[in-house]
Image (tube, rainbow, N blue to C red):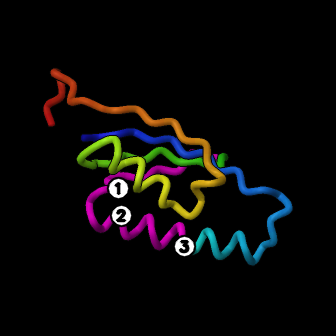
């Protein structure tokens, strides 16, 4: 099942820089691991925002929830999830 996920990150301004840097490093490693596994198929930055659009290919709603809630930045994110289906006019 394909999902389009918008992630808006809101790290508290009073979080110590070292803590924020650690969370971001763990986030990057986890995201790259999911990309290598094929679960996180595409990742696009939203220009001018601390946000991204991502495409996930997972077996179920529950799997997506597990992957997203495992993100180190999850406690600081607002997520919008849109299930996707193949369009009948698509040639891909």
**Residue 79: which quarter of the image?**
top right
- Lower sequence index among marks 2 and 1: 2
For the residues marked 1 and 3, what is the alpha-carbon distance in whole angstroms? 16 Å
Please give the label number shown on residue 26. Answer: 3
Tag 2 secondary structure: helix
Give the number of callouts. Answer: 3
Q: For the view shown, which residue lies furthest in the top direction? A: 88
Q: Residue at x 72, y 56 (%)?
A: 11
Residue, disc 2: 34
Q: Which quadrant does the N terminus fall into?
A: top left
How packed is label 3: few (under 14 Cα within 10 Å), some, or many (20 or more)?
some
Tag 1 secondary structure: strand
For the residues marked 2 and 3, what is the alpha-carbon distance in whole angstroms? 12 Å
The residue range painted magenta reads 26-48
Residue, disc 1: 40
- Lower sequence index among marks 2 and 3: 3
Q: Is residue 63 magenta?
A: no
Front residue of 61 and 89:
61
């Amino acid at each position: 099942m394909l999902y389009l996920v918008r992630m808006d990150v809101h790290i508290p301004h009073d979080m110590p820089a070292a803590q924020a840097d650690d969370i971001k490093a763990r986030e990057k490693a986890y995201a790259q691991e999911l990309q290598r596994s094929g679960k996180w198929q595409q990742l696009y930055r939203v220009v001018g925002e601390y946000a991204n659009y991502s495409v996930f290919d997972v077996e179920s709603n529950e799997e997506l929830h597990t992957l997203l809630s495992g993100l180190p930045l999850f406690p600081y994110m607002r997520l919008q999830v849109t299930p996707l289906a193949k369009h009948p006019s698509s040639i891909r």
